[in-house]
Amino acid sequence: MESSGRRSAAFFDLDKTIIATSSSMAFSRSFIEGGLFTRTQAVRTAFAQFLFEVGGADERQTSRLRDALSELVAGWDVAQVEAIVAETLHEHIDPVVYQEALDLIGRHQGNGRDVVIVSASALEVVEPIAELLGADAVIASRMEVADGRFTGEISFYCYGPAKAHAVEELAATRGYDLDACYAYSDSITDMPMLDAVGHGFAVNPDRTMRKTAHRHGWGVLTFRRPVGLRARSGVRPALVAVIAIAAVAAVVFLALGSRRDGSD
C-alpha cells in the first residue's frame, strides 16, 4: 500500500498500451461501410499517418496528422459513430485488449495507487473506460461538439508535451508525488510523460523506443497476450462495451502512441 503522505498514481496510455492495436485502423472498414467517410478519405488519412511514422514525431508531421483527422471527422454524427462501434466491437476490439495491461492496472489498484488513463483520444469516450476500470481520473483530448456533431475543432490536444503538462497539473491538484508515480506507453511521442514520473515504462518498444528507454532509465515491458474480455473472469461485462468505444476516440484523435514488473 502507499505510505502515508506519499500519494501516487499510475498513468496509462490507451492504444497499443492497453489495447493491442490502433483502434482507428481496426474500425476503418466499419466506418466506411457506415457512410461516415469514403475510401479516398481513408487513404488520405492513412497517408498522413504513414508520413508521421516515417518522418518522425516532429511538429510539422504532428500538425499534418492532426489536421487530417480533424478534417475527416468534422460533421460526423456522434450517435451514429457510437452505434457503429457497438455493432462491431466484438469483431474489432474484444480480442485485442492486453491481459498484462489489465493485470497491471489491478496490481496498482491493489497497492492503493490511483489509476489515470491519459490519451490523445476524445474525453467523451475515455471517461467511461476510466470509470469502469476504477480509475480516479482521465486526461484526454477535448473536441468541440455542436448539435450532436463533431465540428472538427480541437480545444485541447492531449499529445506529446501537452500530456506531460496535464499530468503535472493533475498531480499538483491531487497531491501526487510524481517521483513515486508510474507511467506506461508504447510511443516515443509520450517521452515527456514518461520522464515526468519516477517510474516510466516503455511497452513493447521498437528499436528507437528501446534505446530511448535505456538512455532515460525507463523500464521495458512486453505485453503478448491480447485477451477476449467476454471470456476473462473477473471483468465486468460492461467493460467490453466501453473498451470498444475507444475506437471512436482513435478515429477522432489517433492515439499515437510506447524493467521488470511495473508495480510495487
Image (cartoon, grey):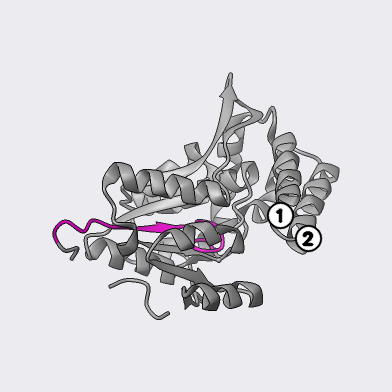
Residue 107 pos. (x, y %): 29, 68
Q: Tell me if 166 is positioned left or right of 137 in this view.
A: right
Position of 130 compared to 246: left or right? left
* The disc label shown at residue 58, or none: 1
Q: Nearer the viewer, residue 96 or 260?
A: 260
Question: Above or below — where is 167 with respect to 205?
Answer: above
- The residue under the point 44% across, 67% down is 200
Prevailing secondary structure class for the magenta stretch in the rendered image: loop
- Say which element carries label 1: loop
Q: Amino acid at mark 2?
A: Gly
Q: Which residues are magenta?
A: 4-19
- Residue at 59%, 63% in the rendered image: 187
Q: Residue furthest left?
A: 4
Give the distance between the C-alpha atoms of the residues marked 2 and 1, in whole angstroms: 8 Å
Q: Please provide percent x and percent y for residue 22.
A: 62, 58
**Residue designated by label 2:** 55
